[in-house]
Amino acid sequence: MGKLTTHVLDTTRGQPAAGMKIELLKDGALLRSITTNADGRGDGPLLEGGDLVTGSYELRFHVADYFRSQAIDSPFLDVVPVCFRMEAGGSYHVPLVCSPWAYSTYRGS
């Protein structure tokens, strides 16, 4: 059975980004909204099993709100969109590594 997971690392502080809002969309429709836990992850998969269908998805990481909560007043980044395609039954891990000024993502394992 497939699943989709994510996590966020804050490179400014060198630790997981706890308390960041992440939204999952498919074809522009909001499927789920979570806030990362102390480990910078959701408490479970964003999608799994039969809910993971083939198609185009988008994760929206609310980076500016997170960094403002960490006393960084003027982050350059606002909401970081990561658009990707998934196939039914696959397992996908889409992490974000970020600072207030830059980010990177990849397909993890």
Image (cartoon, grey):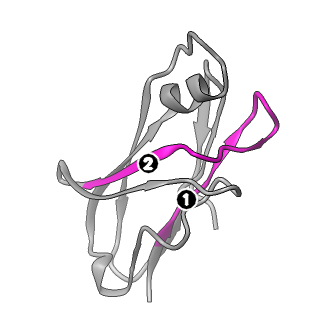
Which quadrant of the figure contains the C terminus? bottom right
Q: Foreground mark, 1 or 2?
A: 2
Q: Which of 74 and 105 lies nearest the eye of the viewer?
A: 74
In the image shown, does 108 or 39 lie closer to the viewer?
Answer: 39
Cα distance in 3D space between marks 1 and 2: 9 Å
Q: Which residues are magenta?
A: 4-25
Q: Which residue is mark 2?
A: 22
Give me the residue at 61% from left, 36% from top.
104
Report the residue marked by disc 1: 6
Quadrant (top left, top right, bottom left, bottom right) of the N terminus: bottom left
Q: Is residue 27 left or right of residue 45?
A: left
Residue, x 66% and y 20% (percent of image)? 71
Residue 21 within the magenta-colored segment of the rendering: yes
Residue 63: x and y in percent read 52, 31
Does residue 50 appear left or right of residue 59 in this picture? left
Please tell me how crowded label 1 is: few (under 14), some (14-19), or many (20+) other residues with Cα within 10 Å: many
Which residue appears farthest toward the top when viewing the image? 74
Task: Name the quadrant containing residue 11.
Answer: top right
- Amino acid on which the number 2 mark rests in the picture: Ile
Residue 84 versus residue 62 in the image, above or below: below
> Total marks drawn?
2
Seen as rendered, the residue at the extreme right is 14
Spot occupied by residue 20 in the image (x, y as percentages of width and height): 54, 43
The magenta stretch spans residue 7: yes
Q: Earlier in the sequence, mark 1 or mark 2?
A: 1
Q: Position of residue 103 (x, y in %)?
A: 60, 31
Cβ–Cβ below 8 Å for labels 1 and 2? Answer: yes
